[in-house]
Amino acid sequence: METLGDFLKQRREAAGLSLEDLAGRTRIRVENLRSLEREDLEALPTDPYVRGFVKLVCRELGLEPSDGLVRYETLRERSGPPDEMTWDEETTEEAPGLLERALGDPENVVRKAAVVGRWGGLAAGVVVVLALGILAFRWIDPFAPRTTKPVAYLAGEAPATPSPELAAIPDPAPPEPEKSEAEPPAAQQPAASPPPRPAPELVGGAAGGSRVVLRLEAARPVRVSVLLDGVGFPRTRSMAAGESATWKADEFFVLDVSDGGAVRVFLGDRELGPAGGDGSSVEDLTVRPR
């Protein structure tokens, strides 16, 4: 079985595409495509990104993504470092404990203990000063209100007749009940927003193979954008009158059309009709088999 780099390079050259052409279609940087064909894994980003690169390149060249991923796994197994630590070795390796590190460098332990003791004593002194200040403030409160109301009785014995000073002090007024805010009338409440409109959709016959084939035929000049399986980057192109174009995906397509009536949609051998009305643009139109 040919390697991943030879597999991608030969299929790209057979399609008549340069690295710059393939980068413009897949939105992958030329440096990453060149490193992928050279099988230079150290120059590539992390594994999830490289898997996405392989899938996008295979789909753009009309290849099965699984063929590229099998070769990528073989390349990873062949390029792995021979002395790489496995998960079992990493989890079973014992790290030195706190006591072992202390016994290995006793002078460092003494230095740290001296620093901790000096700063610990200073922190304790600050805490004691703050506590004494809080207690003194509570005992002598300069902001405590001074009352001028005379004492009415002592030792629980009320006087026979109230003194003139007590009679002159008015009784406190009872608190007013809190007013509850009236609920707004029903006419002033905001109306509920209407539910979102569902995305347009065209459904064709059952899929006849492992890939779904979409074909668009233009009756007049129109601009279309096709997104494969809802992931990656959309394929955008301008179609002339009488021109047709074909795309392949695993499950479904999402279309944006500048003039829905200018494009007829075919899914495999089945015609689904126009993408929309004449002169009206279509966005997020899903085309899928049953």
Image (cartoon, helix red, strand yellow):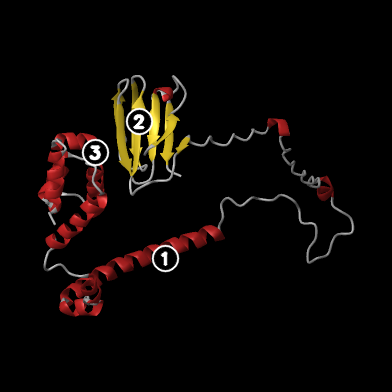
Label 2 secondary element: strand
Task: From the top left corner, tell me how far across and down residue 156 is, in percent.
Answer: 80, 65
Counting other residues with Cα less than 10 Å from the Cα at mark 1, is it few (<14), some (14-19), or many (20 or more)?
A: few
Please report the residue visible at 79 percent of the width from the left and 45 percent of the height from the top: 173
Earlier sequence position, callout 1 versus callout 3: 3
Earlier sequence position, callout 3 versus callout 2: 3
Work out how far the residue at label 2 is from the one at label 1, CA to CA, in angstroms: 84 Å
What is the quadrant of residue 112 in the picture?
bottom left
Task: From the top left corner, tell me how far across and down residue 283 is, in percent.
Answer: 42, 30
Residue that mark 3 sits on: 26
What is the quadrant of residue 287 in the picture?
top left
Label 1 secondary element: helix
The N terminus lies in quadrant:
bottom left
254, above or below 143, in the image: above
Please report the residue visible at 41 percent of the width from the left and 64 percent of the height from the top: 127
Type of amino acid at the residue the image marks with label 1 = Val
Disc number for residue 128: 1
- The residue mark sitting in front, 1 or 3, is 3
Counting other residues with Cα less than 10 Å from the Cα at mark 3, is it few (<14), some (14-19), or many (20 or more)?
A: some
Counting other residues with Cα less than 10 Å from the Cα at mark 2, is it few (<14), some (14-19), or many (20 or more)?
A: many
Residue that mark 2 sits on: 216
**Residue in front for this viewpoint, 49 or 208:** 208
**Residue in front for this viewpoint, 112 or 103:** 103
Type of amino acid at the residue the image marks with label 2 = Leu
Type of amino acid at the residue the image marks with label 3 = Thr
Please report the residue visible at 33 percent of the width from the left and 19 percent of the height from the top: 221
160, above or below 264, in the image: below
Left or right for 49, reference 220: left
104, above or below 10, in the image: below
Please report the residue visible at 46 percent of the width from the left and 63 percent of the height from the top: 131
Work out how far the residue at label 3 is from the one at label 2, CA to CA, in angstroms: 21 Å
